[in-house]
Image (spheres, helix red, strand yellow):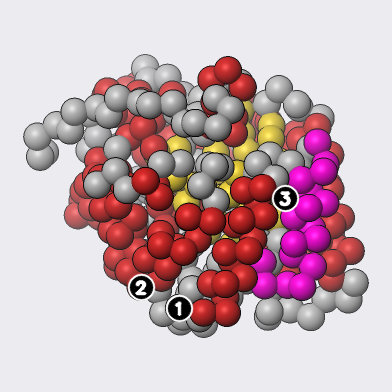
Amino acid sequence: MQRRDLLKLLCAAAAPLPAWAAEVPAPAADHHQHLFSPAMARLLDTGAGSGPPAIAASDVIALLDAAGIRRAVLLSVAYVYGSPVRKIDDEYAKVRAENDWNGAQAALYPDRLRAFCSVNPLKDYALDELARCAANPQLRHGLKLHFGNSDIQLENPEHAKRLKEIFAAANRHGMALAVHLRASVSKHRPYGAVQARVFLEELLPAAPDVTVQVAHMAGTGPGYDDPAADDALSVLAEAVAKQDRRTRRLYFDVASLARADMKPHDAANLVQRIRQIGVERILYGSDAASGNNLRPREGWAAFRQLPLTEAELTRIAQNLAPYLRAPEQAGSRRRPRVAKLRQPAQQ
């Protein structure tokens, strides 16, 4: 695919938005974006152009500009090389290369992009790669973990023990964690309240000093029609609502959840969970600019259609995760207190 054709595809967001959407400020940041190096794009292409195109930092910047979004977080997909469904020669070398490529891409736009490295936490090289990333100025800000792709089963004591080690190491290095909590869908792994309680009771206490961002609000998207994910989210949302100290630094991104064609009851359920958690902990994100995923501009327009109040939408648009804030905003060890918006009457 020619690069100009790729840019046309990525910026197909040029369709005009409704007038009401143009009147609302764009999000301050997209907290869930991905790049695909040429090597990664080749790996994911199973034939006939079925995989995502290579996506570079310049492509994401074009999408952000089209949406009026200033900043974005690039969550490396290096963990794909460690997926148990693949057998990769020189696997760890390719994981390192993908992480480094993401860091180098983010460095091209240092005031706009921030890269997280990633790894399958069950791999014997995971702690080494975490430490290596922590020493890299472009990758030291955070770690992306994908429980589904890595086939993590939190009900397995050995998996939970390993994850506690990874969380504790990230905490020691001051690295935020972005976690795709949803268990593997393709393998039909158990997922719900049981797994969420392991996350709450065992993993979060191992990383008490860093931001932990739950991707897709504990689901996977597109849309919000996954009962198992809602069961998992209900455990975390209840803990947040009760001001459980283990959730002090817990945030949730909404990447790929809002869709223009959502069923009303799915939209209502999503809004209920957002309000239960509190809008100050909700981070806008749109996911990789590939396939049927909505691009940042359309993703925000779809999110704007949820039955949230203007005040709630404005607050979510303004939210920045602590790892994106200036040091004086984020604080050194303590998360600043934020006043929760009063919940409106049921709509």
Marks 2/3 in contact by CB < 8 Å: the verdict is no
Residue 121 is at least partly visible in this image: yes
As helix, strand or loop, the secondary structure at mark 1 comes to loop
Which residue, given by chain and number where applicable, does mark 3 sit on? Answer: 117
Q: Amino acid at mark 2?
A: Val
Residue at image point 81% right, 30% down: 108
Residue at image point 38% right, 55% down: 223
Q: Amino acid at mark 1?
A: Glu
Who comes first in sequence, dot 1 or dot 3? 3
Marks 1/3 in contact by CB < 8 Å: the verdict is no
Residue 188 x/y as whole percent:
46, 81
Magenta range: 121-137
Screen quadrant of the C terminus: top left
What is the CA distance from the residue labelled 2 to the residue labelled 3?
A: 28 Å
Which residue, given by chain and number where applicable, does mark 1 sit on? Answer: 155
Which residue, given by chain and number where applicable, does mark 2 sit on? Answer: 194
Q: Residues within 10 Å of mark 3 (few under 14, many from 20)?
A: many
Is residue 215 on the magenta stretch?
no
Residue 133 x/y as whole percent:
79, 48
Q: Residues within 10 Å of mark 2 (few under 14, many from 20)?
A: some
Nearest to the observer: residue 154 or residue 95: 154
Is residue 136 on the magenta stretch?
yes
Marks 2/1 in contact by CB < 8 Å: the verdict is yes
Residue at image point 35% right, 73% down: 194
Q: Amino acid at mark 3?
A: Cys
Who comes first in sequence, dot 2 or dot 1? 1
